[in-house]
Image (cartoon, helix red, strand yellow):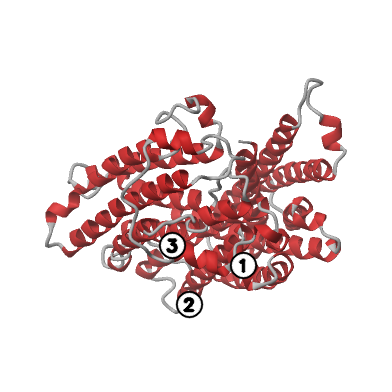
Amino acid sequence: MVSFVLLWLRAAGLVGQALALGGAAFALVVLARAREPHVPHRLRSTLAIAAAGAALAAAAQAGILATLARAFADDAGWPIGALLGSTVGLAGVARLVIALAVAGAALALRRAPSARGGWVLLVAGALLAASGALVGHATGREDFGWLLGVGALHQAAAGVWVGGLVCAAALTVRHDAQAGIGWLRPFSGLAAVAAGAIALTGIALALEYVATPRVAIGTSYGAMVLAKITLFLALLAMGALNHLALRSQRASAPADAIVVRRRLEVEAGLALVTVFLAASIASAPPGVDAGVARASPEEVRHVFTPRWPRLDTPTPAELVATSGLGDPDAPRSAAEIAWSEFGHNVSGLFIVAMGVLATLERTGRARWARHWPLLLIALAGFIAWSLDPEGWQTGVVGFWEQMRSPEVLQHRIVLVLTSAFAIAEWRVRSGRRPDSVLRYLFPVAAIASGVFLISHSHEVSNAKSAFLMEVTHLPLGLVSLVAGWARWLELRLPPADGVGPGHVWGPAFCLFGLILTFYREA
């Protein structure tokens, strides 16, 4: 559970520092050049975002220190002194102090704007982002000096881009829908510079921590880096579309402005998802250090080779007799693997059926297919039965003891999301609440599921076995994100512009289901 809590606290800290630095840069570079009556209001909103981000970073860092102290506590109490005297503790305290200073500077500047105060905020925000490198992998390497510098620049550039995107999306959502978005043009150039810095520093870090294609496809660290590159390319594509729209003569037209606004929402959302993935990468050991735990290309290819789905499963009694259920240090038995593959494969068949029905509904010729969300209720019931058999199915591990496992907790969260999505989407599709806010539960649940999948981990002592279990989660997470954001655009765009995204999420469901149907672990 400690690793799970630290992962999400680290992700919250990265989001917070991005909002702090990105908000400061957005205020100085974008709003300072705008010549519109709404600028003072936008400036106050941006500085409020920066202050909230810094406060989030401070709270997350305090949580990390408290979690570490609690994890190493013994009968003598919490080892506060030893923790604060370590490199991790000193770096954490420094980040906490800087984050509080940034929050204070942002609030002060919000009350009394000044050019000097803006630059102070920007420098402090850059220090907060750069200090993130002090608690990364660089401090454990022999040549840590240049790695600290590259890592600091990488995090600062990411903060400018991600935080700026969130500010841009937030301000355009709150702004008058009939107004143009030409005032965002300066951010387009700032984002381009930040993206270039991210790419260059990312390549340098990948050469150090991944080094070879075999490491990239054979370790959790490398596979997550590949997923991060995929998200980065998607962000570049979205950014390029918005850049062209902002540079066109029609940027002030309300019809074109609304499309850019909606794409900004997706771009900001994807950027935040990428930050969560970055936190997951920071929690994994560098791929070059995997050694014998690295999977071979043949083993990875074997996992992704389609085969007939497993439709039979061991009985609970056979599981108990032939495996070490509930013991993460015990090697996984053939019965455990068979049970897991059966659960994934059957779930995949459910989702393929939902994708087919959803696609049929889009044709307008199969109105009855609108009830496809009801299959999700059946799927939720099946998942509740098949997941984590060491629990109520066999009684090997008690309910509350089982819930202390991060893996089980993530499974239960996804189960709740699935159930909520099923009920809400069926009510929307059946015509009971077609314009209700409940219609947004589908994309939110799909996006949240995607985040959980790309950051999901298993409590297995054998690192290679864990990787071969997790490697399919990354494409599943990416496909889930595609489905969620496509549905989001369909709902948020004007009907004529939402047709294209609306045709995407149904086939994405089918692809998600097919990956699960052919899922295998060994």
Residue located 61% across and 48% down the image: 11
Real-space CA distance between mark 1 and mark 3, rounded to the nearest whole angstrom: 35 Å
Between 84 and 382, the one nearer to me in the picture: 382
Residue at 62% x, 52% y is: 463
Mark 3 closeness class: few <14, some 14–19, many ≥20 residues within 10 Å? many
Q: Earlier in the sequence, mark 2 or mark 3?
A: 2
What residue did someone put label 1 on? 216
User: Up-down: is 478 above or below 427?
Assistant: below
Determine whether, in the image, residue 37 is placed left or right of residue 23: left
- Mark linked to residue 261: 3
Q: At label 2, which amino acid type do we have? A: Leu
Secondary structure category for the residue under label 1: helix
Nearer-the-camera pick, 375 or 397: 397
At which x and y percent is residue 227?
A: 54, 63
Question: Which residue is the site of mark 2?
Answer: 244
Residue sitting at x 43%, y 66%: 305
For this view, does 403 lie left or right of residue 349? right
Q: Quadrant of the N terminus?
A: top right
